[in-house]
Image (cartoon, helix red, strand yellow):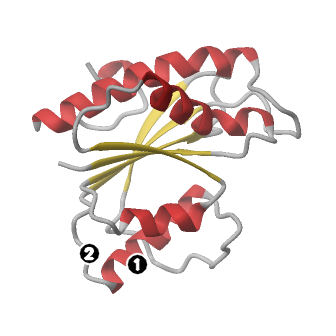
Amino acid sequence: MRILVAGVGNVFFSDDGFGSEVARRLLAAGGLPAGVEVVDVGIRGMHLAYQVLEGYDVLVVVDAHPGGRAPGTLTLHEHDLAGAGGDAAFDPHGMEPDAVLDLVGALARGVDASELRRVLVLGCEPATTGAGMGLTPPVAAAVDDAVDVLGRIVARLRAGEPFTATTDTGAIR
């Protein structure tokens, strides 16, 4: 099984850099299992869309994900890749994650790349996404938790153990 973990975000907008920091931490730790690749795509959504076409089974996007929860709260969602309409606007300099995922579905159908079976989004509630460098304390504290959750997700996926993406990341054991 090939799994791509993609850190998404803009490090110049405070907590929006969450996904990039998680990817950096995973890459620095090393020791990734065979078949698992981690990339920090930052704001290069088109790069991610095309990289997915290289034949991954699962894409796990890590990003700031506002949802009205307490800052630093992690959530896990499953993206309905089959339900994506494929009508995302092309913007080579940066695309919102939903637009990237929509584009991935359209590109995969266009080139008959059916390998991608699942898309998960591990999100973190930001405190702020205003201009500024560095994560706020509650989001910075969530980075290690996200690395732990990703380890559990990857282990379950590689073992073929079923699980349902829920907003409760603690349910992924």
Residue type at tag 1: Leu
Q: Residues within 10 Å of mark 2 (few under 14, many from 20)?
A: some
Residue drawn at point x = 71 percent, y = 68 percent: 93
Q: Residues within 10 Å of mark 1 (few under 14, many from 20)?
A: some
Name above or below for residue 60 compared with residue 171.
below
The image position of residue 89, as x and y in percent, is 63, 78
Query: Label 2: which residue?
Result: 113
Place residue 50 in its image quadrant: bottom left
Residue drawn at point x = 53 percent, y = 26 percent: 25
First of labels 1, 2 by sequence position: 1
Place residue 85 in its image quadrant: bottom left
Place residue 15 in its image quadrant: top right
Q: Disc 1, disc 2: CB below 8 Å?
A: yes
- Real-space CA distance between mark 1 and mark 2, rounded to the nearest whole angstrom: 8 Å
Query: Label 1: which residue?
Result: 107
Q: Which mark is residue 69?
A: none
Quadrant housing the C terminus: top left
Residue drawn at point x = 26 percent, y = 37 percent: 164
Residue type at tag 2: Ala
The image position of residue 22, as x and y in percent, is 54, 30
Name above or below for residue 127 compared with residue 97.
above
Tag 2's secondary structure?
A: loop
Residue drawn at point x = 31 percent, y = 68 percent: 82
The image position of residue 116, as x and y in percent, is 27, 61
Residue 162 showing in the rendered view: no
Query: Which residue appears farthest toward the left when viewing the image?
Result: 160
- Give whichever of 59, 33 is nearer the camera: 33
